[in-house]
Amino acid sequence: MPREKVSIPDQDGTNVEYEGVPLRDILRRAGAPMGKELRGKALASYVIAKARDGYQVVFTLAEMAPEFANEPIVVADKRDGKPLFGYQGPFRLVCPNDKAGARSVRMLQDLEIVRLQK
């Protein structure tokens, strides 16, 4: 799968580079509606990202779609060119455009696609 690099500020003010696969590409491969399919009722779809420690966050599919918000959210497996360590990995969501890091889920374990029914 294609890989991307994104940078975010670390706690000490320096930039940290993460590398991984764009979340939208993983979701597309899993069958989530993207592109022309992301219209109408499909826009009420969202993703729950779950960490090993029980932490959870939600993203809408439209946040990642190039036609809408086009957020560069990455499922990272490397930090500054090295595999993620201990409490970070083995995978981490990285959301470089978020002002706070609360949705950058460490110890990512599951991604669940949910479609709301009306």
Image (cartoon, helix red, strand yellow):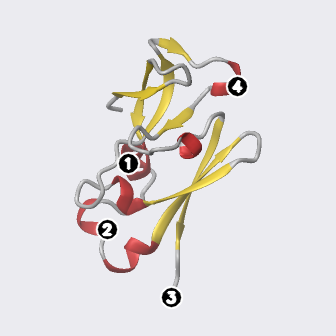
In primary-sequence order, the first of circles 3 and 4 is 4
Residue at 44 percent of width and 12 percent of height: 81
Categorize mark 1 by other alpha carbons within 10 Å: few (<14), some (14-19), many (20+): many
At mark 3, the secondary structure is loop
Q: Amino acid at mark 3?
A: Lys
Left or right relative to 82: residue 71? left
- Residue 95 lies in quadrant: top left
Label 3 crowd (10 A; few <14 / some 14-19 / many >=20) = few
Expressed as whole percent of the image width and height from the top left, the position of residue 22 reads 38, 39
Say which mark, if any, is on residue 87.
4
The quarter of the picture where the N terminus appears is: top left
Residue, x 34% and y 48% (percent of image)?
71
- Disc 2 versus disc 1: distance between alpha carbons? 12 Å
Q: On screen, 116 above or below 21? A: below
Q: CA distance from mark 2 to mark 3?
A: 16 Å
Which of marks 1 and 3 precedes in the sequence? 1
Mark nearer the N terminus (1 vs 4): 1
The x, y position of residue 24, in whole percent, is 38, 48
Mark 2 highlights which residue?
38
Q: Amino acid at mark 4?
A: Tyr
Residue wearing tag 1: 24
**Dot 2: few (<14), some (14–19), or many (≥20) neighbours within 10 Å?**
some
Q: Secondary structure at mark 2?
A: loop
Distance CA(mark 2)–CA(mark 4): 34 Å
Q: Secondary structure at mark 4?
A: helix
Please state which amino acid type lies under the numbered disc 1: Arg
